[in-house]
Image (cartoon, rainbow, N blue to C red):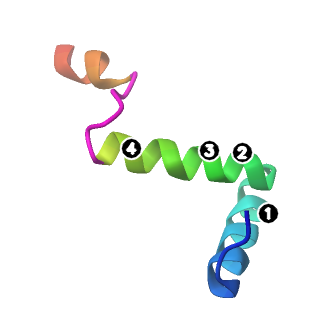
Amino acid sequence: MEMAPEIEEALNRFALEQEITREEALALIARDWLIGQRLLRAESDDEDATE
């Protein structure tokens, strides 16, 4: 999938900084966004509730 050049650049920079692949970076970003939107349950929610 191609994206706007500025998004591609930021995505590549993020992947390099995290030492992960572009695909892993996309998955991580999507997961974080989905958790933020409460569309995906965060695994750590159960741990946070007990502390």
Residue at screen point 72% across, 79% down: 9
Residue 30 placed where, x, y %?
51, 48
Q: Quadrant of the C terminus?
A: top left
Residue on which disc 1 sits: 16
Residue on which disc 3 sits: 27
Of 42 and 1, nearer the camera is 1
Residue 29 placed where, x, y %?
54, 52
Callout 4 secondary element: helix
What segment carries the magenta color? Answer: 37-43
Verify whether residue 39 appears in magenta.
yes
User: Left or right: where does residue 3 sit relative to residue 36?
Assistant: right
Q: Amino acid at mark 3?
A: Ala
Do callouts 4 and 3 mark residues in contact (Cβ within 8 Å)?
no
Alpha carbon of mark 4 to alpha carbon of mark 1: how far? 23 Å
Q: Amino acid at mark 2?
A: Glu
Q: Earlier in the sequence, mark 4 or mark 1?
A: 1
Residue on which disc 2 sits: 24
Residue at screen point 49% across, 41% down: 31
Q: Amino acid at mark 1?
A: Leu
Q: Earlier in the sequence, mark 2 or mark 1?
A: 1
Do callouts 3 and 2 mark residues in contact (Cβ within 8 Å)?
yes
Residue 7 placed where, x, y %?
62, 77
Mark 1 surroundings within 10 Å by alpha-carbon count, few (fewer than 14), some (14 through 19), many (20 or more):
few
Question: Most prominent secondary structure in the magenta stretch?
Answer: loop
Q: Earlier in the sequence, mark 4 or mark 2?
A: 2
Q: Earlier in the sequence, mark 1 or mark 3?
A: 1
